[in-house]
Amino acid sequence: MPFTPGQPDSARRRLSIFLAVLIAVTAGLTVGGSATISASAAGTATISGTVTGDGSPPVSLEGASVEAIAANGSFVASSSTDASGNYSIGGLDAGSYTLQFRAPYGANFVSQYWGNKLTQQSADYFTVASGETLSGKNALLAVGASIGGNVSGGGAPLTGANVYAYTVDGNWAGGATTDAAGNYSLSGVAAGSFTLQFVAANGANFVSQYWANRATLQTADYFTVSPGQTVTGKDAVLVSGASISGNVKGQGSPNVNLSGVYVSAYSTDRSTSAYTTTDSNGNYSLVGLAASSVTIRYSAASDQNYVAQYWNNKPTEESADRITVTTGQAVAGKDVVLLVGASINGNVQGKALTNIPLAGASVSAYAPNGSFIASATTNTDGNYSITGLAAGSYGVQISPAPGANFVTQYWNGKPSLAASDHIGVTAGEAVFGKNALLEAGGTISGNLKGEGSPNVGLANASIRVYSANQNVNGYDSTDANGDYHIVGLPAGSYTLQFSAPYRSNFASEYWNGKSTSSASDAIVLTAGQSVIGKDAVLAVGATISGNVKGEGSPNLNLPNVSVSAFASDGSWYGSDNTDALGNYTILGLGAADYTLQFSSSGTTDYVSQYWNGKSIGGQPDHIIVTAGQTVLGKDALLKLGGSVTGKVMGRGVPNENVSNVFVYASMLDGSWGGSAVTDSDGNYSLRGLAPASYTLFFNPGPGSNFVRQYWSNKSTPETADAIAVISGQVSSGKNVLLEQGASIGGNVQGQGSTNTNLSNASVYAMSTDGVWFSAGMTDDAGNYTIVGLPAGSYILQFVAPSGANY
């Protein structure tokens, strides 16, 4: 099954909701007036209202979904509307909430958040008291636009293909599925700029693509949708995918077919990918791959003690052999045998008058370079078994179950991974007796309120503690009364931070009423000590708000522009994204001197800037904000920028398109301009560049044996040719041909009575004048290769693996 690994979590969440609704409707389920409450929602407050769709008169919407979202952004409970559009969400704790209103499946109305906002970031929040019934939380959903088209492949319509819409900032905006004729209609779309992703049905061997025939979300084209507009003709023709198939066995006498093995394929830049699991005979088939060079990973199920590997019997993605596939090619016979894994076994107890077994503790194994390898959870007797380990040396972390007041430790009773003793295992060895006794932890507790008449307990605020060396930290979220309790802390000195609930207008602070970490009073804990009464009252925050437009005739309101507030020392203090009308409000600011940055994210043709029309990289103007002040009218007009586009190829027979090349634009004085990454066809597009002259730097991705260069075929920024960028114009055809690089390889060992091959050691190649060029990392045999080097003389630096005593 092809998929997009870079899909945002918010998109996946909305996709799962979309699919769930789709399944419910096709199953013939009658939806209306039902409610879902999360396990954490067990209060006595209720929110109710009515959801209607815009019309003459407004229409009651049956089957609309209404979700209550807490101030920390987490889902709490939901309800669906009845035939009259009424809903009621009960069982809520006291606290601050926003609501999300989703139109019924197939209804052409725009979903929204409370306050008629389009995003959770810009949503308004309201407070509900314990036992309160808060009625009248009504919503009138605007008539939506629709996007329609046809999806075909192999000369035939594609049934069951999924079409997803994304905004310019990557947020998922809706989805639809093609019918038997390959047609789709995506309804309930808000006004804005969108791109589309086209994904063939599960198991269909066609390559996913973005509009218009682009390989990645980053390189996709966008189109504008007006309020209520019917957009048609957004068709896509998917090309036939390549496939890779084979069999997976487990080492034995004889070897055995392994079912349920997770098999995944990725190109270096992740622009193409696929995954599947082996069937009962151990067979697999990866489909929907674009022409590319991929690596494959084979990972046994959690209850199977076999070592994960990459093709061809390699331990890491960097060392893996790559498989090159062409368009529509079927590659068969990629069979593997997974080796029996080693295991680390033991028991975890908590220190007490009578030591107690700790259930639910997490025990994790790490490689010498700090990479996570595998983990296990203790059973009711405190026993654990980490399986599927390759021969090697591992650091082990033992953490109590969430909420258990015991101190995390590393083997063997050490406070950090760097200080941890390592456990060595040979191939297939089962190591027993790696037991741990966790010390009782210290605790810090208190209450958090927001300033008011009277002060009010703040629910869902974030409370964090940090040790002086940042190696130890703890966290809790306040309950409905504003109480918190942080457990499992070792003896030490701590900084305590109070962060206001999401989208609430209170200024965050540190203990004891301090505005910065460096000024905060320390809290000293002895072993097992409980410190209480660390209370705080957050002051009402200041706000900065305004409107963002893009230069035009007339000027246009710009949605999804990120507006961030920075203090004079560069520290970030708050942000907001503009709504559909270009409006923003940054909440919860303390008294300070701020600058604002307006960022178009490089996905539009408008130039990012500081407040008051000042260029990024220059000297920004500042806004002085006093405690609790409401600052209005901090508007911005983003100027129309220019673009640079081109193609990157690598020298070969024939020359090849090179994906995952980082393209950086810099002004002649060295100031930052923008960046882009080439897609699977080697194309790049730098958008929203301020009018100026630029140099371009082309840097191939990790592991590429092509030599980096400046435009045009120059080796240094001083000799690079300049490209003039003009407002509203595209400077196209800035193509480059990268030369094949030289390579340096060798072996790294650690000195001893018998020298030992060192895995995960870093090797850096620098020119004789100290300029860094490239790097490599040793494999399990201590071997390394540094690629992509231009002709010249180099100095090599060898750095031991993290935690190794060399």
Image (cartoon, rainbow, N blue to C red):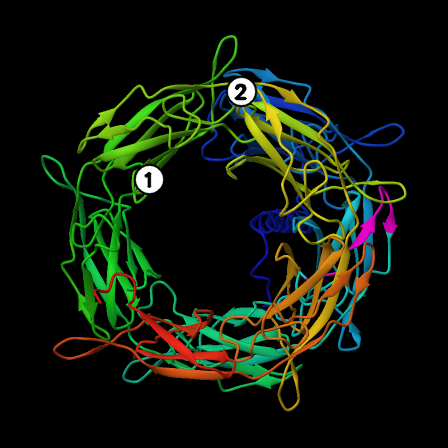
Q: Secondary structure at mark 1?
A: strand
Within 10 Å of the Cα at label 2, are there few (<14), some (14-19), or many (20+) other Cα atoms? some
**Left or right of 180 on screen, residue 272:** left
Q: Quadrant of the C terminus?
A: bottom left
Label 2 or label 1, whichever comes before in sequence order: 2
Reading the image, the residue beneath label 1 is: 473
**Left or right of 315 on screen, residue 692:** right
Residue extent of the magenta highlight = 219-230
- The residue under the point 49% across, 79% down is 789
Reading the image, the residue beneath label 2 is: 45
| Above or below 673: residue 597 | above
- The residue under the point 29% across, 81% down is 252
What type is the residue that disc 2 sits on? Ala
- The reply to whether residue 120 is visible in this rendering is no
* Whole-percent x, y for residue 65 in the image: 66, 36
Within 10 Å of the Cα at label 1, are there few (<14), some (14-19), or many (20+) other Cα atoms? some
The dot on residue 638 is none
- The reply to whether residue 104 is visible in this rendering is yes
What type is the residue that disc 1 sits on? Asn
Rendering quarter of residue 561: top right
Q: Nearer the viewer, residue 777 or 392?
A: 777
- Give the main secondary structure, helix, strand or loop, of the magenta stretch: loop
